[in-house]
Image (spheres, helix red, strand yellow):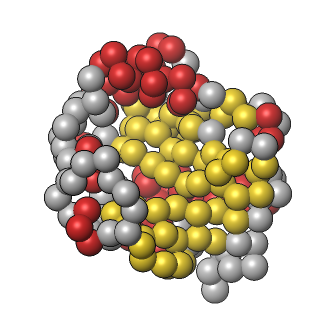
Amino acid sequence: MELSPFTEHDEPLIVALDGDPEVMRYISGGRPTPPEVVRERAMPQLMRRYACLGGLPGFWAARDGGTFLGWFELRPVRDDSADTVELGYRLRREVWGRGYATEGARALVEWAFTDLGVRRVTANTMAVNAGSRRVMEKSGLRFLRAFTGEWPERIEGSEHGEVEYDATPTTWPPK
């Protein structure tokens, strides 16, 4: 698997990814993201580069042999500091269960601590998203807390709240 920065040519891939109701289940309740929202909001975010990361992007396109798998996120929680970064991922349903999410997440966590000097990696998901929670655990993150956040609208499972996982250089890699 290769991770590379996004370009404007990747827009149709994101439209397809965010158009899959199962991929979007824990994000929008399964509603596809309209193409104009991908173009106007998602693509600029996916292509944004961060000065505190030395000009690197916060999102990476994942490919295997040229086939688009989805994306990984490792972006600063605060725009002016790389001390704490958020880990995230969104993969095409066709590649779920093949280990790509864990492989990419582990690689980014290791890179964060060994090359970027990050002090904390955090990740969160809905409490009922067992697949994403497993990836966080397999990636070496530890359960930190359960919490209830504000959702713009209720989606199935949101009543159970969210969970946060994290890792620091002293807790990662897990023993």
Name the residue at 46% across, 62% down.
124
Foreground residue among 122 and 11: 122
Name the residue at 51% across, 44% down.
72
Q: Which image quarter: residue 110?
A: bottom right
Foreground residue among 73 and 4: 73
Foreground residue among 38 and 175: 38
Q: In the visual, does 128 lie left or right of 106?
A: left
58 up-or-down from 16: above or below: below
Q: Quadrant of the C terminus?
A: bottom right
Q: In the visual, does 75 lie left or right of 94?
A: right
**One can see residue 53 in this view:** yes
Foreground residue among 169 and 85: 85
Q: Residue furthest bottom?
A: 175
89 up-or-down from 67: above or below: below
**One can see residue 95 in this view:** no
119 up-or-down from 26: above or below: below
Report x, y in % for residue 162.
Answer: 37, 67
Report x, y in % for residue 121.
Answer: 64, 62
Q: In the visual, does 2 lie left or right of 39?
A: right
Name the residue at 19% across, 37% down.
31
Tally the marks: 0
Q: In the visual, does 80 lie left or right of 23?
A: right
Report x, y in % for residue 19.
Answer: 24, 31
Name the residue at 59% across, 54% down.
86
Report x, y in % for residue 80.
Answer: 78, 43
11 up-or-down from 135: above or below: above
